[in-house]
Amino acid sequence: MRIAVVEGDGIGHEVIPPTRDLLAILRPDFEFFEVEAGYGKWQRTGQAITDDDISALRNADAILFGAITTPPARDYRSVILRIRKELDLYANVRPVKGTGVDLIVVRENTEGLYSGVEKIEQDSACTVRCITRKGSERISRYACGLAARRRTLTIGHKANILKSDVFFRDICFAEAEKAGVPVRECYIDALCLDILLHPSQYDVIVTTNLFGDILSDVAAYLVGGLGLLPSANIGENHSLFEPVHGSAPDIAGRDIANPIAAMRSGSMLLAHLGDHGSAALVDQAIEQTVLKGIMTRDLGGTAGTRVFSRGVREELERLAPGR
Ligand code: ATP
């Protein structure tokens, strides 16, 4: 298996290498290769990601991705949005798991307000929100597939205001009916509050691109913050795994970033490739390390990124001796 590794910028350089180490321990057969992309590359070369980089990512069996800082330039095109589009990674899957919470936000990943149809003029700026039948059908089918194995599907939308969400909601309902999945709907603003008040009532939530981005950051509050949440970007032929958090320039290079979100993304990568045993070992090693009281500052501990990562690696070696 060939695994592309994109550290990106900021804390990507601190949380991705220890994640790759865990995968390398469990899967000596994985062949890792680095792809440089991001703000640093843009500053050095004028390009944040090249066509060759995209081809390299296309040739990987899976991609482990850190985070990228968006440069303050008007003509800059987001690297992760380009990768999601070019590799057609249409489903962004964000599990949020903790005490009394076990939900999955399934966010449409290729269109909506992130379609890239935008224009800035002297006195106005416009971003077009494109929602297509194909995009809505496949994301709702994906969410129904997950909900069928779990409990219920909730559609998050703003159909009382946005015609594009009337379209999206109706397609989601039709797909849920076909799949025989129990379904309900909720306005996205009300949903952002209600998942905080009644998290146990939610299971799989399907929503559009920007709403899903915001909702999963809100849900991070339920389980201890952004440093814990992993995500998967899934398409028909490609897959990319990244922490929900960004490059966090404010804490980059200070050895205080929590690598759990990245490590859990590594666990999702293993599970997606069918290695559920190794995925469970990564999750267990993280849990055991935290139970021993080794935690980064965001969780109330004193361990740095490196100390915490060493703790997880040692736990993993204990749980899977000889691997
Ligand atoms: P970007 O522009 O790349 O999205 P950002 O700083 O706007 O970066 P995030 O990187 O998501 O957005 O970070 C938001 C805040 O959450 C940061 O200020 C940081 O303090 C905190 N944070 C994010 N990730 C982590 C982490 N892994 N460990 C600890 N704190 C984190």
Image (tube, rainbow, N blue to C red):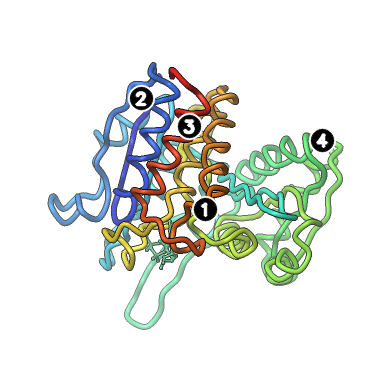
Residue type beneath disc 3: Leu
The spot of residue 233 in percent (x, y) is 51, 41
Question: Label 2 is placed on what type of residue?
Answer: Asn
Left or right: residue 39 versus residue 207 is left
Closer to the chain start, of discs 4 and 3, is 4
Q: Nearer the viewer, residue 171 or 321?
A: 321
Q: Quadrant of residue 124?
A: bottom left
Q: Amino acid at mark 1?
A: Gly
The residue carrying mark 3 is: 316
The residue that disc 4 covers is 179
Q: In front: 158, or 256?
A: 256
Give the CA distance from mark 4 to mark 1: 44 Å
- As measured in the structure, the alpha-carbon distance from the residue carrying label 4 to the one carrying label 2 is 33 Å
Q: Would residue 220 appear left or right of 169 to someone viewing this image?
A: left
The residue wearing badge 2 is: 59
Q: Position of residue 162 (x, y in %)?
A: 67, 67
Q: Quadrant of the N terminus?
A: top left
> Mark 1 = which residue?
293
Q: Secondary structure at mark 1?
A: loop
Q: Going 40% across and 34% down the picture, which residue do you hit?
A: 63
